[in-house]
Amino acid sequence: MKYKIFAGICLLFICIFAGTSLYYKEERARMYGQLADDPVFVREHSRVLGNPDARVTIVEFMDPACETCAAFSPFIKKIMAANPDKIKLVIRYAPFHHGADIFVKMLEAAGNQDKYWETLAAMFRSQSAWASHADPRPERIWEFLPAVGLDINQLKTDMNDPEFARRIKQDMADADTLKVRKTPGFFVNGRPLEPFGRQPLLHLIQEELEKNY
């Protein structure tokens, strides 16, 4: 009898916990859904890849020095390629790694030369050489940027533009508002990725594709 009572109490607590977790997730989804059109997700300066009129928007808060960001990049591009013109990717900055704001400024300066996406791809490809947690050597990044076709002297001048620091500050403020605590932080049409992972992200994107197309 005591065992049955104990088991019943445990089952009750499990049900309460599951119900509370579900309610919390639904409330977060509802809250972010209401914010989907809010500029907190997409700012005027945000970089956009893909069809501007796509009905599915992936917002990614990323850090160029983040290994997971680099790992997810080809995965997202593969999904976009499989759904041409239906998905757009919006890049926001959350340079949580020490000194990573420098790499963001490099990216933005590369955008002045119309080499933004090529530079980001080169950063991710070479990341293990300059951003290794075991032996970080950020100065080595300069070795890999000439291959993109950048004017390096111009890049070094442009990256000091105070506008880039303002953009980082705005993105970090928006990340804080959206409770992004680590990178990459994903939102699909305003819905946060929970739980984190490739399959959950694919599932979330597929849900939004089915809703909107």
Image (cartoon, grey):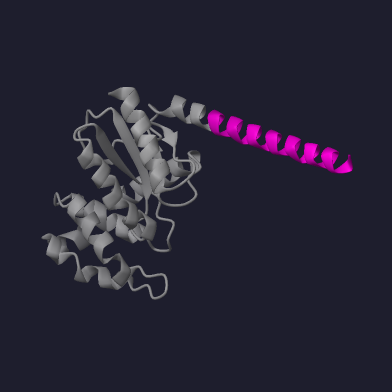
Residue at image location 36% in from the left, 40% down from the top:
202
Most extreme residue toward the bottom is 135
Front-most of residues 94 and 212: 212
Q: Is residue 125 left or right of residue 3?
A: left
Name the image quarter holding residue 123: bottom left
Q: Is residue 43 above or below residue 35?
A: below
Q: Main secondary structure of the magenta part?
A: helix
Residue at image location 31% in from the left, 55% down from the top:
104
Residue 210 locus on image (x, y percent): 33, 26
Residue 127 locus on image (x, y percent): 30, 65
Give the quarter of the figure containing the N terminus: top right
**Highlighted range, magenta:** 1-27
Residue at image location 46% in from the left, 24% down from the top:
34
Q: Is residue 39 above or below residue 75?
A: above
Name the image quarter holding residue 33: top left
Residue 20 within the magenta-colored segment of the rendering: yes
Front-most of residues 146 and 10: 10
Residue 68 locus on image (x, y percent): 38, 56
Report if residue 143 is visible in the image: yes
Residue 116 within the magenta-colored segment of the rendering: no
Most extreme residue toward the right is 1
